[in-house]
Structures are given as C-alpha cells and as structure tokens.
Amino acid sequence: MSGELTGTGLCNCGADRCTGYKRDGRHVEKRDMPKLAPYRPNGSLCHYEKDVPWDGVIEWRPIEPFHAALTYAGFRRGRSAAYFYWTDDATGARYPMFMSGMDGALEAGAVQGNRITGRFTVVKMGQNYGLSYLGPAE
C-alpha cells in the first residue's frame, strides 16, 4: 500500500463504530493494514494508539528492527500496563518499553548503568505498543 496513514485513529467515514483509518484520503480497515505502529511526528513511539498528541497527528510506520543507543528516561504506570521510557541519544525520540522487554534486556546484560545499546523492534501487547530488545548491535 502506498501513502502514509495519519489521523486520530478513526477515519471519520460516517460508519457507526468505524475502526478504520485513512490512507491517502481513503478508508482502510484496521484488519487490512500491514504491521504498523503509531508514532508522533517527532519520531517518538506512542504507547497507546488513542493517546493522540495535541496536534492530533499520528504517523503509522512499518514495524521494522532498528539499531539505537537509548538512555533511561523514567517509568509510568497506566491502567493496564507499567512501562519504562527510553530516549534515543541520536534523535531525541522517546520509546516506551514493557516490563517484559526490560526483563529480557536485563537478562541479556544489555543495560549498562542507565543506557542500553542494541537492536530493537516494536511489539504490541493488547492495545499498547513498546520496544523489545533483540540483541546487540551488529
């Protein structure tokens, strides 16, 4: 599919309880979308797809492994999840990481002080998105 998915999560097509999105101005059902994750325009991963930033813009990007050097930026608790926040040293983008992702990184010995460097991917748990540590940078 070409084009970028943007919007607040709903396409506003007028259908009752629409769960679709708009791509190039056309309605796309959520089940028909490739594996995408919601990002803010500054590159930060949204923890929850309905956690819409003040400008109302979410960019849906393909989920692909990436290399990064991240610095610990705190933690948060929500109704259904507890997670850590990391900031990308190169871009300043923020990424949530589930406790299970942190557990895997700690078991691998990847966390050095308040930093972690390696390969990551985005995973979805329920309706939430976060990073998972894949291993050392190659």
Image (tube, rainbow, N blue to C red):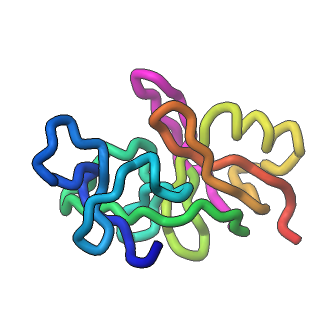
Position in image of residue 133 (x %, y %): 75, 50
Which residue is at the far left? 14
The structure residue drawn at horizontal position 56% and vertical position 55%, both measured from the top left corner, is 35
Left or right: where 89 falls relative to 45: right
Which residue ends up furthest to the top in the rendered image? 79
Closer-to-camera residue (71/121): 121
Labels in figure, total: 0
Q: Residue 100 location in percent, x, y? A: 70, 32
Q: Quadrant of residue 84?
A: top right
Q: Quadrant of residue 25?
A: bottom left
Q: Position of residue 23 (x, y in %)?
A: 32, 68
> Is residue 80 located in the magenta-colored stretch of the structure?
yes
- Which residue is drawn at the image coordinates 42% and 62% (left, top)? 60
118 drawn magenta? no
Above or below: residue 39 compared with residue 79: below
Of residue 88 and residue 26, the one placed in the foreground of this image is: 26
Q: Residue at x 44, y 77 (%)?
A: 2
41, 86: nearer the viewer: 41
What are the residue bounds of the magenta stretch?
A: 68-85
- The quarter of the image holding the C terminus is bottom right
Q: Is residue 100 placed above or below 69 in the rendered structure?
A: above
Residue at 21%, 59% in the rendered image: 56
Q: Position of residue 99 (x, y in %)?
A: 65, 32
Seen in the image, is 133 located left or right of residue 72? right
Is residue 123 depicted above or below 82 in this figure?
below
Name the chief secondary structure element in magenta: strand
